[in-house]
Image: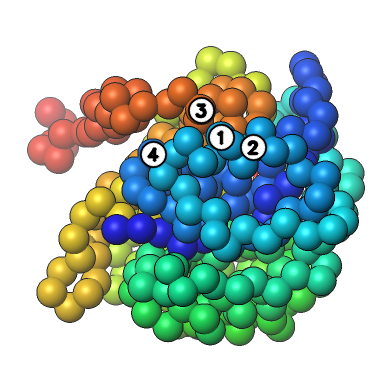
Amino acid sequence: MSILVVGSVALDTVETPFARAEETLGGAASYFTTAASLYSQVNLVAVVGSDFPREHLDFWRGRPVNLAGLQICEGRTFRWAARYHMDMNARDTLDTQLGVYAGFHPVIPDEYRDCELLFLANIQPELQMEVLEQAPRARLTVLDTMELWITTTRAQLTEVIQRVDILLMSEEEVRQYTNRASLVSGVRYLLDLGLKHVVVKQGSYGALLFSANGTFFSAPTFPLEEVIDPTGAGDAFAGGFLGYLSTVEPNSDGQYAIYDIRRGVVHGNIIGSFVCEDFSIGRLRSLTMDDVADRYRILVECSHFDPLWRFGA
Ligand code: AMP
């Protein structure tokens, strides 16, 4: 089953305490597209400027990626710069330049219209809404966002949240958006907006899945000895999550089984861990499903514990 994605395609400049990469391929949709195309065809909706290096387009053309919805406009590609702290779960955004995104309106090509899985990657909420409205057949809609949109376009973001099935947010974003100190209380607030599931991304600590039916699942992260650049881990998480779901059949009522949603969260964590091993999409270029399966096996082993215990045993 193919996946439709709208989001940023960018040129990123990233600095960590140990290295720096300038104007590399970035953007939420870039990470998502590259990650999810390991599982299924991805239909990309985005815009780049006339300065966007053609080699990135050639790379996607070599994978199951449909670029019919990628507009190339006169002007500058979206640019973003950030600096990571020694604890690479924390970063400061140094610069955001929307460039051609400032005047962009997504147009979904006819060939994308039957897509049943929709990912609204990080971009202005009004653009996410325009895509939602053009994709009435989407059976599962997943939304991601960022601090900038929580602070500058909260009302529009809320409208989008009220229209989707699943929201992905970092723990910090949940606190920012809900203004609640307790994560569980913040998630309750979000679920009350009508979401079926909320996935809370906790960087190097894993991810939590909260569902409207009251169930809860905690997925561990794959421990890495060396993190080169965590940029895009959240978007790659989404790529693994929806990528996995694109390979399984939903129930007869069109809903995905909770155990598949959980497996999807584990795939998300695994793909997110690989992204951190290089700048940009570097590690995803050579990633195979065998690599993913190896980490899946290790995570099952390291997070399984015996349900049988007794006091004083
Ligand atoms: P992540 O590390 O998963 O939060 O994603 C970082 C990516 O999001 C970078 O590649 C940026 O180019 C992109 N990005 C940063 N800020 C924004 C923004 N405000 N809107 C859309 N994309 C953004």
Q: CA distance from mark 2 to mark 1?
A: 5 Å
Disc 3 marks a residue whose amino acid type is Arg
- Residue drawn at (14%, 40%) of the image: 307
Which residue in the structure is indicated by mark 2? 56
**Are the two marked residues, 2 and 1, in contact with CB atoms closer than 8 angstroms?**
yes
- Judged by depth in the image, the label closer to the viewer, 2 or 3, is 2
Which residue in the structure is indicated by mark 1? 59
Which residue in the structure is indicated by mark 3? 285
**Could you tell me which secondary element the residue under label 2 belongs to?**
helix
Disc 4 marks a residue whose amino acid type is Leu
Name the N-terminal-most of marks 3 and 1: 1
Name the N-terminal-most of marks 1 and 4: 4
Q: Is residue 276 above or below residue 67?
A: above
Q: CA distance from mark 2 to mark 4?
A: 16 Å
Q: Left or right of 178: which side holds 94? A: right
**Could you tell me which secondary element the residue under label 1 belongs to?**
helix
Quadrant position of residue 115: bottom left
Q: Left or right of 291: which side holds 155? A: right
Residue 92 in view in this figure: no
**Are the two marked residues, 3 and 1, in contact with CB atoms closer than 8 angstroms?**
yes
Disc 2 marks a residue whose amino acid type is His
Q: Residue 231, percent across and down?
A: 66, 38
Name the N-terminal-most of marks 3 and 4: 4
Q: CA distance from mark 1 to mark 4?
A: 13 Å
Q: CA distance from mark 3 to mark 4?
A: 10 Å
**Are the two marked residues, 2 and 3, in contact with CB atoms closer than 8 angstroms?**
no
- Judged by depth in the image, the label closer to the viewer, 1 or 4, is 1
User: Which of 5/217 is in front?
Assistant: 5
- Residue drawn at (15%, 69%) of the image: 251
Q: Is residue 154 above or below residue 54?
A: below
Quadrant position of residue 242: bottom left
Q: Does label 2 point to a residue whose CB lies under 8 Å from ligand 1?
A: no
